[in-house]
Structures are given as C-alpha cells and as structure tokens.
Amino acid sequence: MQISEAESIVMDVLWRRHPLTADQVVAALADSQQWQEPTIKTLLNRLLNKGAVSAERHGRRYLYAPQLQRKDWLLGESQGLLERLFDGRIAPLVAHFSEHRRLSREDIAELRQLLEEIDDEPR
C-alpha cells in the first residue's frame, strides 16, 4: 500500500497510540508540524479511503486506528528503496553509506553481529 510522506507522519501518531479522534491526532501533531486542522483531517480521510486506517463511530466522533501495520509498511518501503536505488541488493546500500562515512563504529559492530548470526543459521 502506497502512502505519502505526510500520510506516514499521521500514521506514526496512530501506530504509537490508538484509537484516537481526529482532534487527538491534530493535538499530537501540533508541536511537530505546521499543518492546519483541515490538512490533517484530509490526510486521515485519504488514509481511510486507502484502507490504511479504520474509523469507528463513537458518539458524535470517529475513532481512528491503523489497519496497515508499521512492520508491513516498513518492509514495503525498504524493499522499494532497495529496488529503486540499488537493484534490490543490500550490499551496495551498505557500501554507499560506508563510502560516505555514515556508518558509526556502533553500526559496524551491529552489522558484524548480524552477519555472524546469519552465518550461524542452518541453510
């Protein structure tokens, strides 16, 4: 499911805590975004139309909850990034960050640990 960058910001609010009313989503984004209330409600409506969120009537308001799971969205986004930029391969991605010194010592240690774990898995 394709969601825009702005929609992903709204989703992040709902992934952290749900269900929420539209007013609660607006309040949660007040400090971090310069969006007006109608913009946020439009984004919620788009997400609802895409099936990324559900809305359940609660009195005079609707409670919004994510239907798209964060892990599923992350998987799709990361696979799309790899396909678009690195021909679907992870090694060139890591090499790119390495060449531009964007890997900290901690990152390198974590990568080594992951590679050891992968090597230890039965095939």
Image (tube, rainbow, N blue to C red):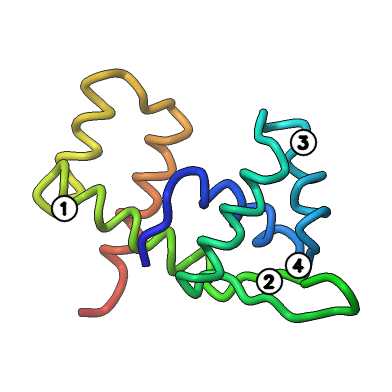
Residue under label 3: 30
Q: Which amino acid does label 2 sit on?
A: Ala
User: For mark 4, what is the residue?
Assistant: 18
Within 10 Å of disc 1 (Cα), the crowding (few <14, some 14-19, many 20+) is: few
Residue at figure coordinates x 85%, y 79% from the top left: 58
Nearer the observer, disc 4 or disc 3? Answer: 3
Earlier sequence position, callout 4 versus callout 2 = 4
Label 3 environment density (alpha carbons within 10 Å; few <14, some 14–19, many ≥20): few
* 120 to 30, vertically: above or below: below
Q: Where is residue 113 in the image (x, y as percent from the top left)?
A: 40, 50
Residue 83: x and y, percent? 16, 52
Q: Disc 4 and disc 3: Cα gap in Å?
A: 17 Å
Nearest to N terminus: mark 4 or mark 3: 4
Residue 65: mark in rendering: 2
- Kindly indicate whether the residue at mark 2 contacts the one at mark 4 (C-beta within 8 angstroms): yes
Q: Would you say 117 lies left or right of 52 here?
A: left
Taking the spot 30% from the left edge, 73% from the top edge, the residue there is: 121
Callout 3: helix, strand or loop?
loop
In the picture, which quadrant includes the C terminus? Answer: bottom left
In the image, what residue type sits under mark 1? Glu
- Number of numbered labels in the structure image: 4
Of circles 4 and 1, which is in front?
Answer: 4
Marks 4 and 1 in Cβ contact (< 8 Å): no
Question: Dot 2: within a 10 Å radius of its alpha carbon, few (fewer than 14), some, or many (20 or more) residues?
Answer: many
Marks 2/1 in contact by CB < 8 Å: the verdict is no
Classify residue 91 by image quadrant: top left
Residue topped by disc 1: 83
Quote the CA–CA distance across marks 4 and 1. 32 Å
